[in-house]
Amino acid sequence: MTKRFVLMLGVALLVGGASNARCQAVSESPAAAHNGWVTATPESAGVAIKPLQDMEAAIRAGEFKKIGSVLIARRGKLVYENYFDGNADTVRDTRSATKSITDVLVGIAIRERKLSGVDARVLAILPERARKMQNPDPRKDKITVEDFLTMSSVLECDDWNEFSRGNEERMYVIEDWAQFILDLPVRGHMHVDENEEPPKYGRLFSYCTGGVFVLSEVLHKATGQRTDRYAQDKLFGPLGITDAEWVYSPLGIPQTGGGLRLTGRDLLKVAQLYLNGGNWQGRRIVDEAWVKASTHPHAQIDDETEYGCLWWLKAFKSAGKSYPAFFMSGNGGNKVVAFPGLDLAVVITSTNYNTRGMHEQTEKLLTDYILPAISQSAGNQ
């Protein structure tokens, strides 16, 4: 596929009009007709239609803003999809959801023994970066791949703090993004008192897109392939994904921290891959142990949310019950969610970029409509 340069702040693609179709329950049909997905009716997979019809009515009534698509897979089969903007072929800019795909690629590189493991030291892999690095510090020499996978490196990088020297908005105006990140000073930590408790899981979380971008260079150096090409050969190709559109840095390095565009069905494949423990339709792509480690908590974000290796971890509450999940998440309210206990994968794409409540409204779709469609179903056993 011909790759094209996509500006980080590019103009949104104008693809089709909003769908006015009613409930798009997927009827059984050959996998080839659905981009490699085996399909089934919702009822046969234990999914009730009525809550999904209510969801569609609420979206069409404007109760939920700028929802692009909703797709559901249950028990490994595509059972529902609806498009409120564009269609099945529209690639979706899910922003930081890209980060979770970077975790998959690191796992594949380790499986192939191209990368020694998560303990591999970043500057040992990228010695040319170390030689010209500003703010040298022995603690920076110890930064590992795992530190960037878990958002817990010692670098002063925090996208949630507009004053942070490593905030991603400062990175984008620099030509060499990786050097910008590695040049950052080590972050300080103020001890409030002598009895301060150490962080849960032993890691201090600090959301840093730039650190995930550095993993693009790590993967290139370890595998000998540029990351977008490695992804196509080792992940997207086996999943039957042909329409991946990457963002590139000014130096032409694939942005593994955000902006990758995929269709809704293809995003759903990534969640299903991890639900399957690293298998897709009988083919092993990444080790099961890697999937478990990636979706196991490594850092705590708040009382309800934890972080694995570039995957978010949270239990969603619906109708008095709690449903543990791991998920991809991106600006705009984009969510690609896996519920292991329900054998359920959900994609919700949205373009509410940089707006208050963007994540809350997509989570409301999950808790008020999609999860009730499962819990109300007689087939949910």
Image (spheres, grey):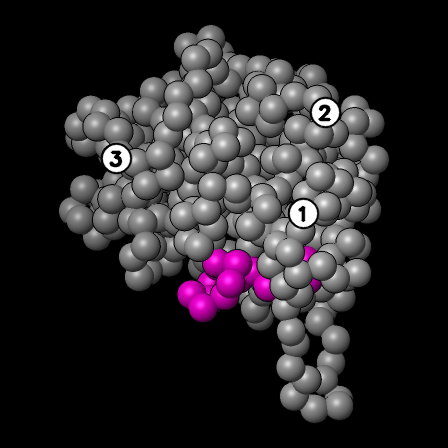
| Residue ID for mark 3 | 11
First in residue order: circle 2 vs circle 3? 3
* Above or below: residue 374 compared with residue 29: below
Rounded to the nearest whole Å, what is the CA distance between mark 2 and mark 3? 33 Å
**Residue 341 location (% of width, % of height):** 62, 45
List the residue tagged with mark 1.
132
Q: Residues within 10 Å of mark 1 (few under 14, many from 20)?
A: few
Q: Which mark is residue 223?
A: 2
Give the Cα separation between the discs numbered 3 and 1. Answer: 35 Å
Q: Secondary structure at mark 2?
A: helix
Q: Earlier in the sequence, mark 2 or mark 1?
A: 1
Q: Main secondary structure of the magenta part?
A: loop
Left or right of 282? Residue 320 is left
Viewer-side label of 2, 1: 1
Residue at left 57%, top 35%?
Answer: 101
In this picture, residue 223 sits left or right of residue 259: right
- Vertical placement of 260 versus 280: above or below? below
Is residue 310 something one can see in this rendering?
Answer: yes
Residue 155 is covered by the magenta coloring: yes
Residue type pointed to by label 2? Thr
Q: Is residue 260 left or right of residue 64?
A: right
Read off the magenta span: 153-167
Helix, strand or loop under label 1: loop
Nearer to me, 21 or 158: 158
